[in-house]
Image: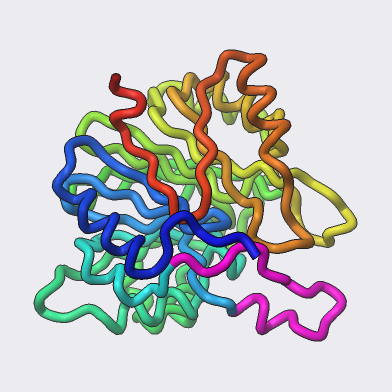
Amino acid sequence: MITPVRQHQALVRDILDGSALPGFRLWWLGQSGFALQWERRLALLDPYLSDSLTVKYANTDKPHVRMTALCVQPEPLASLGLCLVTASHHHTDHLDGDTLRPIFRQETARWPAVRLVVPEAWRALAAERSGRAQNEIDGMDDGTVLQTSGFTITAIASAHETIERDERGHCRFLGYVIQFGGRTVYHSGDTVLYDGMVERLRPFNVDVAILPINGADPRRRVPGNLDGRQTAWLGREIGARVVIPCHYEMFEFNTASPDDFADECRRMGQACRLLRCGERFDSMEIER
């Protein structure tokens, strides 16, 4: 099993230490999960910090055998300036009750309320999984904008593998453009390319694009994502200053090597950063 670069108390300490630094920081938490820190504020993007899927699919024909050890329990993160949690869609590795419930149980008068941002199409499900009331959850849809704790979040449709809408017309899969302090991070969630995607994202002048690379393989019996070459191409086309890949090295049946992605980035001249689970990316890397 892969051991995270920083794990548990070491990762918590690194996040604490980072809060006094200029710029912003990102830590890969595994799968599509990231911690984003800026000015002593912490946001969690699609965190999956449990073994719920391994337990759920044990003794089935689709076991979710974990490749990378858990980097941190969810509870300590609630006291690190956490103000925002996002989920891009309903799949458990992006909207995980076993991650969300412990976070929200930690809320006290000492800490400000944490905003939970999800697609409107899954707000009821998010309430069920998180233990929060529906009216305490921010439901978003393609093109909607939310401002909270200095972050401006714009929802952009994602296609996993198509742009799907519920019976009310709400997008089932979203990516989030997060703007703060003159910087922009785009977290796509699960997606493939679709017509108009580049044109929608290019005006945001994305500094860091967080994109999946596990690709599409029908034998996995799960919806597909961008592969490494497509991820490099999308990063270049939207003008991202750096691309960080994700959605690999979590489950044995649904992973990919980042080598094709890194090779394609080099060929295209697209800056990229491969993180190991628990490793920090510092914005100073692109500000030098």
How far from the left and from the top, in percent, is residue 91?
61, 66
Quarter of the picture holding the C terminus? top left
Please tell me which residue lies in front, 16 or 26: 16
Label total for image: 0
- SS assignment for the magenta stretch, majority: loop
Dividing the picture into quadrants, the one containing residue 12 is: bottom left
The residue drawn where x is 75% and y is 57% is 254
The residue drawn where x is 30% and y is 68% is 77
Please tell me which residue lies in front, 98 or 249: 249
Please tell me which residue lies in front, 3 or 136: 3
The residue drawn where x is 56% and y is 67% is 69
Task: Reply yes or no: does residue 62 show up in magenta.
Answer: yes
Outermost residue toward the left in this view: 110
Task: Reply yes or no: does residue 120 show up in magenta.
Answer: no
Image check: 109 left or right of 195? Answer: left
Magenta range: 52-71
